[in-house]
Every structure is written in C-alpha cells, then in structure tokens.
Image (cartoon, helix red, strand yellow):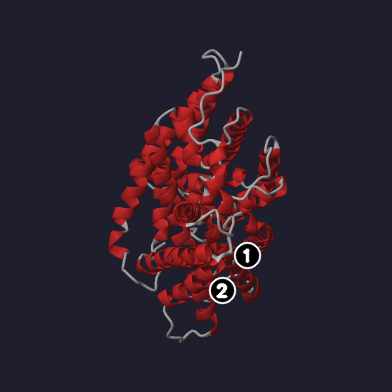
Amino acid sequence: MTDPPRPDPFPVSRLDSDAGALFVLQSKGEWWHAGFHLTTAIVGPTILTLPYAFRGLGWWLGFVCLTTMGLVTFYAYYLMSKVLDHCEKSGRRHIRFRELAADVLGSGWMFYVVILIQTAINTGIGIGAILLAGQCLDIMYSSLYPQGTLKLYEFIAMVTAVMMVLSQLPSFHSLRHINFASLILSLGYTFLVVGACINLGLSKNAPKRDYSLEHSDSGKVFSAFTSISIIAAIFGNGILPEIQATLAPPATGKMLKGLLLCYSVIFFTFYSAAISGYWVFGNNSSSNILKNLMPDEGPTLAPIVVIGLAVIFVLLQLFAIGLVYSQVAYEIMEKKSADTTKGIFSRRNLVPRLILRTLYMAFCGFMAAMLPFFGDINAVVGAFGFIPLDFVLPMLLYNMTYKPTKRSFTYWINMTIMVVFTCAGVLGAFSSIRKLVLDANKFKLFSSEVVD
C-alpha cells in the first residue's frame, strides 16, 4: 500500500506567481527536446579529456570505470525521473532539484545544500565554457597569425560579449534548436578527432606509445582517483529536474526516451574518443587531445583543415553548454526580480533580465580570464559536485520515496552505489586537491597559457 501524499511545501498553485518557473523553466517541450538538453549538458568538449583520464587508469581499469560511470549515471537519472514522476502523480510537481531534495528528505537544510552545490557546478561550467571557447579562438588566431599580439584574455572578452547577447534568450525551452545543433556538433568534432587519431596511429609518423602508469604505488592511487573524478564530472549534469521541468506535463515516461537518445550519443562519442586518443598517445595524452594533435613544437599531426573544423565545432558547442548551465542561475535571479503579472518581454521584466544576465556573464568571463587553469579544477568539481548530486542523491531520493524493503535487490544496489561513490568522492577530492597544490607554481593570473 502506498503512503498517502504529504502536504506539498511547493504547491502547483504557487507556480502562477513564480517567475522562475513561468519564464525560465517553461513546461512546453517534448521528449526529444529533453534529449537535446541532456546531450548538451553531458556530451561536450570534456570528452576530449577521456584519453587523459585513461592515462591514470590504463586500458582495463579505464574501460571498467567508463562503463561503470555510464551505467550508474543512466540508472541514477532514471531513478530521479521516477521520483519526479511519483511526486507529480501525488500532486507535488517539482521543477527544481533543491525543492525535490528538500521535500523528499523532509529537511529544509537540503534545499540550501543542493542550491550551493548546483550554483558551484553551474558557475564553474559557465567559467570553463568561456575559457575553453577563448582558447579555441586563441588556437585559430595563433595558427593564422603566429606572430600575433592578441592575448588569451582578449579572446575570452570576445566570447563573453557573445554570451551576453545569447543569454537574453528568455527560457530553457527556447534553447531546444540550439541544443539540437549542439548534438550535431558533438558528433561532428568527435568524428573529426577520432578520424585524425586513427589516421595518425596508422601512419609512419605515429608517436611512440607507452601505456605504463606512474612508478610509485601512491602515485598510481592518486592518479587513478583523479581520473575517476574527471570521468564523474564528464558524465555529470546536476540539472536533470530542471531539464524535466521543460517537458509539457504529464512528464511521465518522457525522460526515459530523452535519456535513451542522450546515451546513444554518449556511447558513440565517449568510447571512440577515449579509445582512439589513448591508443595513439598513451600516457602522453594531454587534458585536451587536440593539444596532442597540435604540439607546441613541430608540425601538426593531423590535416590543418580537420583540426580547424574540429576547433570551430567545439567553439560553437561551448556557447550552447554555457547557456544550458546558466539556466539555474537565471531561474534563481528571475524568481526574485521578475513580475509575473507583466509579460515576459515587457519593459518591467526585460530591463532586469538584461542587467542581471549581463552581469552574470561578465562575472564568468572575468573569472575565466583571471584563472586560466580550469583543467585542474575539473576533477575537484567532479568530486565535490557531480558525485553527490548524480551518484548519491538519486539513490537516496528513490529509497526515501519508494521505500524498497531492506531485503530487496534494489535497496542494496542503491546503498552500494551510495557508499562506493561517497568513498570515491572523498578520495577523488583529496587527490584532485593534491594535484592542484602540485601545479600551483604554474598558475598565473590573466595568463595566456592554460595549465594542463
């Protein structure tokens, strides 16, 4: 017998006066739109980091971790979708991660814990997207004008200006066409990079391959957990409830179709990029495989047209990624600043939106220019942010909602995942911070070099 529905601390009746829900998280989408949003949130240029993650794990453990992370995250997102569906059927439709966690766990402090983690993740990814886009422009500029005088922070300023304009798209749903283009772009640059790696690996100019791990046992352990944190960050998104909120109700069953679309793209892109990149470069794999194909010294290791197209595709997709992960910030801002009695494009709502979103993007752009070493921070974000939100909370929310018996397989598989990934998160955080400390002497504010 199911438990009687509990009073909803976030009733649907309040959505009429909730500008964040009414304007930003509009519920108009179909399942394929959710698939586009999910793919943009997960399948990004960070997949070009997978050969680098394999460098700390080796072939066998790399495959195991990549496959395990994929299965666990798909399972976790499916469970969270079921929890959201259950709440909706009980008359308690949640459109925000923080509200879902606070309601199901019955703890007001969870609201603030989730919003703190989400804000850190989303702002971090916004900063990283601008930094990487600026780096793409810098790569193209350096190729065309080797003696050029423009610096990385100037390209970051250009990217930030474009993001300020794009940020004015009013709702998450309005990004559906952009995110479909993002899906195509991810397939495009993956195909180009994988093709370039295979061509190089079969050529007479193939680099010498070494797949050995670090010599010391402690170094192997630290590198392995740093790699696990990187893979966790690559699979994570932390905004599934907000993506499901964009679906036209009832949302039941639609997210599963969106997940299947997303993970079909993940299967092709993640495995092909990881295998081809690590096969060619081994333990010399850079944190961005494009840097291996374009070494600082000597000729490029792939046709310049191929690399140029891949960089352009990455650059364009980074705009979409920055927009997707900004939606939670926009929703929080507009919930307080907008007036639902006025139209979405009325002067009363347009002016605050223009000012607040521009300031948010300016902040992200400034941080990207000041801290051009986001690669090392990526693993820390995975350990502190994505692992709790994507590997622990969904299982906890499911167990609290559906209350499987302690003798059931579902209960124990969920508990096992929570314990294992909590431990992995703690160890990954420690090893990631260790790497930050070791690389600290390379960090220079407003540098034109991105730390690997």
Which is more toward the observer, 69 or 99? Answer: 99
The residue at 69%/42% (across/down) is 260
Residue 342 is at least partly visible in this image = yes
Residue 346, percent across and down?
Answer: 56, 64
Q: Dot 1: what SS?
A: helix
Neighbour class for label 2 at 10 Å: few (<14), some, many (≥20)? some
Q: Is residue 99 left or right of residue 187?
A: left
Q: Is residue 216 left or right of residue 292?
A: left
Q: Which residue is mark 1?
A: 200
Q: Which residue is mark 2?
A: 300
Which is more toward the observer, 240 or 24? Answer: 24
Residue 88, percent across and down?
Answer: 61, 32
Position of 102 relative to 288 (above/below): above
Dot 2 amino acid type: Thr
Residue 208 is at least partly visible in this image = no
Toward the front, the furthest residue is 341
Residue 168, percent across and down?
Answer: 55, 65
Position of 145 relative to 201 (above/below): below
Tell me the quarter of the picture where residue 277 sits: bottom right
The residue at 54%/12% (across/down) is 407
Q: How many marks?
A: 2
The residue at 64%/54% (across/down) is 173
Residue 27, percent across and down?
Answer: 64, 47
Which is more toward the observer, 250 or 303? Answer: 250
As measured in the structure, the alpha-carbon distance from the residue carrying label 2 to the one carrying label 1 is 11 Å
Mark toward the start of the polypeptide (2 vs 1) = 1
Q: Dot 2: what SS?
A: loop
Dot 1 amino acid type: Leu
| Between marks 2 and 1 in the image, the one whose residue lies nearer the viewer | 2
The C terminus: image quadrant:
bottom left
